[in-house]
Image (cartoon, rainbow, N blue to C red):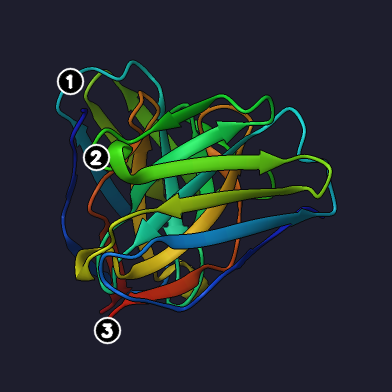
């Protein structure tokens, strides 16, 4: 099973600031990694797939990069609705998720 | 617009079997992979397993001995059975769709509590 770790656990930022979230895999996943956003009481929402492709309807301020074992999700300028928990997911079976990074308001 | 809706008992007794159904509307169940994912309160996401519309399945090895999934294409539904539940199985259970690997549509989630 591939283990994903995310850092930091919590990121405290202000609206308009840039957010940089990290996901590291215990072994190479090539570029086969996705990012999800989850708000309280809601299901996760797919943001990025295959490391750098935005899902349908996702704003351009969200971008993903990386390959192998190290990946980054960047939110270029935080909007109020972006404060949430972000998870990464790899696609080798069993699918696994990282423990999440909470982006909260500073 | 594709919508997924979980249904089933919100309370299950220890050692019994948890049974949930996901109903898909606004689109066909065919030619997609359908997964169950759970999330204990305040914790992260755990993939339970998936079923293709042909009936082929993949299960998480950590749960494989207790999990059974099935699909009913005539009803646009798929189901989860998790046997011999304990308090550790208490979680919000989500159903989700994937073209293959990534989950683009999710149900709203249903809380299942294991308690006597």
* Residue count near mark 3 (Cα–Cα under 10 Å), binned few <14, some 14–19, many ≥20: few
**Label 2 element class:** strand
* Residue count near mark 1 (Cα–Cα under 10 Å), binned few <14, some 14–19, many ≥20: few
**Label 3 element class:** loop
Q: CA distance from mark 2 to mark 3?
A: 39 Å
Q: Position of residue B51 (x, y in %)?
A: 56, 34
Q: Residue at x 41, y 23 (%)?
A: A32
Whether marks 2 and 3 lie on the same chain? no
Q: Is residue A76 visible?
A: no
* Residue count near mark 2 (Cα–Cα under 10 Å), binned few <14, some 14–19, many ≥20: many
Q: Which residue is mark 1?
A: A27
Tell me the subunit letter for badge 1.
A
Q: Which residue is mark 2?
A: A23
Q: Quadrant of residue B34?
A: top right
Q: CA distance from mark 1 to mark 2?
A: 12 Å
Tell me the subunit letter for badge 2.
A
Marks 2 and 3 in Cβ contact (< 8 Å): no
Q: Which residue is mark 3?
A: B116
**Label 1 element class:** loop
Tell me the subunit letter for badge 3.
B
Q: Residue at x 58, y 50 (%)?
A: B79
Q: Nearer the viewer, mark 2 or mark 3?
A: 3
Q: Residue at x 68, y 24 (%)?
A: B54
Q: Is residue B8 visible?
A: yes
Is B96 left or right of B42, judged from the image as shown?
Answer: right
């Amino acid at each position: 099973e591939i283990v994903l770790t995310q850092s930091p656990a919590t990121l405290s930022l202000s609206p308009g600031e840039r957010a940089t979230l990290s996901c590291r895999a215990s072994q190479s996943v090539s570029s086969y990694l996705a990012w999800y956003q989850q708000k309280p009481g809601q299901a996760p929402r797919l943001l990025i797939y295959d490391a750098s492709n935005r899902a349908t309807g996702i704003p351009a301020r969200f971008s993903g990069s990386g390959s192998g074992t190290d990946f980054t999700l960047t939110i270029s300028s935080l909007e109020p609705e972006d404060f949430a928990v972000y998870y990464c997911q790899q696609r080798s079976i069993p699918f696994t998720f990282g423990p999440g990074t909470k982006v909260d308001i500073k | 617009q594709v919508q997924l809706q979980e249904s089933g008992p919100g309370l299950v007794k220890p050692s019994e079997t948890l049974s949930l159904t996901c109903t898909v509307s606004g689109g066909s169940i065919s030619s997609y992979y359908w997964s169950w994912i759970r999330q204990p309160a305040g914790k992260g996401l755990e993939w339970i397993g998936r079923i293709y519309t042909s009936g082929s399945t993949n299960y998480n090895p950590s749960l494989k001995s207790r999990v059974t999934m099935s699909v009913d294409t005539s009803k646009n539904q798929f189901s989860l059975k998790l046997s011999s539940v304990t308090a550790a199985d208490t979680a919000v259970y989500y159903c989700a769709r994937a073209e293959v690997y990534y989950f683009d549509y999710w149900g709203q989630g249903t809380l299942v509590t294991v308690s006597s």
